[in-house]
Image (cartoon, rainbow, N blue to C red):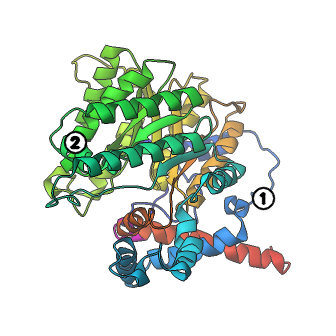
Amino acid sequence: MKSVRSVRVPAATRLVSGTSSARSSVAAGAPGTLWQQQQQSSSPRPTTPRKSPLAKLPLSSVLRSLMILSVSSSPILLKPCIYTLSLLANPRSALWDVSKNPLLNILIKNTIYKQFNAGENKTEVQQSIQGIKDLGCKGVLLGYAREVLAGEDDGKPYDAKACAAEIQTWLDGTLRTVDMAQEGDFVALKFTGMGTDAHHLLKSQSPPSEFIDTGILKICDLAISRGVRLLVDAEEQAVQHGIEEWIMKYQKYCNSKGKGATFYGTYQAYLRSTPATLAKHLEMSRRDGYTLGVKLVRGAYMKTEPRQLIWAEKEDTDKCYDEVVEALLTRKYNTMLQPVTKGETELPPVNVIIATHNRESVQKAHVIRVQQAARGEDFGVDLSYAQLQGMADEVSLELLEGFDDAEASVGVAASPQSAANVYKLLTWGSVKECMGFLLRRAVENTEAVGRTKDSQIAMFGELKRRCRSAFGGN
């Protein structure tokens, strides 16, 4: 198997996000890549100009995205935006409370809320899901917006009744989320959304209480019955080790019941410990005889985590991400992802979600799949891609078109197995409930202004293309 490290991707100016320009295409590849070599060596085929992938988006989405991305990609505008979102997430007066100020509620709901969220009720959520699937995406990663940040409960007197009510609210909301999702979709779980008791248990790496355990098992059973998959978000290191122990408990429960993975954990590539943690979990799944569910992200807590836990350079994070993906997709251990048991070379069964907005990482995974398809290999790994709703839409839509073209270029017939399973991640809840989620999105963008700028350029290019088309241009 050719190493992913030997695959050349488009050269790019090093940006904060490490992505190349949004004006390039994932599907189109670059000089020196397997994609272009196949294009050059294949017999000439009639070609037609490719339609812009973003042409699928409604004009309203393009305009709203361009407005929000213009703010997010500007260091000058982003800071006051974060300050304003912080006031809305933690209002000190009715004026800033979106649940009490109807004009503010309408303004937020039709701008930033609509960009990233699915809706406030089942009807709105399912309309959003259908809209995403109409674009060609496989489905959604849907989450309930309720969350409680670490430390939020510190200093408060313990109230058992209030804590039970917090847990019940989360359980009810999560059950409704599973009910809203459609077969094949994912539902994202944030364990700290259960509040004070869950925080204390996770911090101390204690098992879930009987009440919490019963509720989570009920969620698992409903998901299995509906053909919906569950994934648990990664969180801050103060609670992450406890989260991992809970994940492995419920992975064994769910994933032992059928083929493939129903329950997934999230791994953050910017942590030095991630390869070893993933290797340990792979060995546990091998021992217990089930498929491990892996969602791989770069990480979202750069500003709050102890710096020594994180790779020294961004390039180290990129290397970790891409080499772990290579190992997972080929099911072969490598220098980054090493086995717990010496002498082991092949990974146990695994299902993978590549959750990134980084075009280069998406393209490297894409090349591995093209190589496997060209050799007629059974992929052996259920692979999905995920990007946030309202962000990196150009990557999601290019990926959908790119796999179709790649199959044609190597003479492999399109099939459900080889098609790109692209998902969009979004949350649902009232405007007020979603303010914490929206604030986190904005804070994360302070570390990824370059990446967001790429998306802004792509949206601006699409708007210009539509204007030229409307006035008879090419």
For the N terminus, the quadrant is: top left
Q: Which residue is drawn at 39% across and 60% down?
A: 18
Q: Callout 1: helix, strand or loop?
A: loop
Name the residue that disc number 1 marks.
49
Mark toward the start of the polypeptide (1 vs 2): 1
Between tags 1 and 2, which lies in front? Answer: 2
Q: Is residue 301 magenta?
A: no
Coordinates of residue 210 in the picture (x, y in percent)? 28, 30
Residue 68 percent coordinates (x, y): 52, 75
468 left or right, relative to 315: right
The x, y position of residue 381, in whole percent, is 50, 27
Rendered image quadrant of residue 63: bottom right
Q: Are marks 1 and 2 in contact (CB under 8 Å)?
A: no
Quickly name the residue at label 2: 202
Separation of disc 1 and disc 2 at Cα? Answer: 54 Å
Amino acid type for the residue under numbered disc 1: Pro
**Which region of the structure is painted magenta?**
444-449
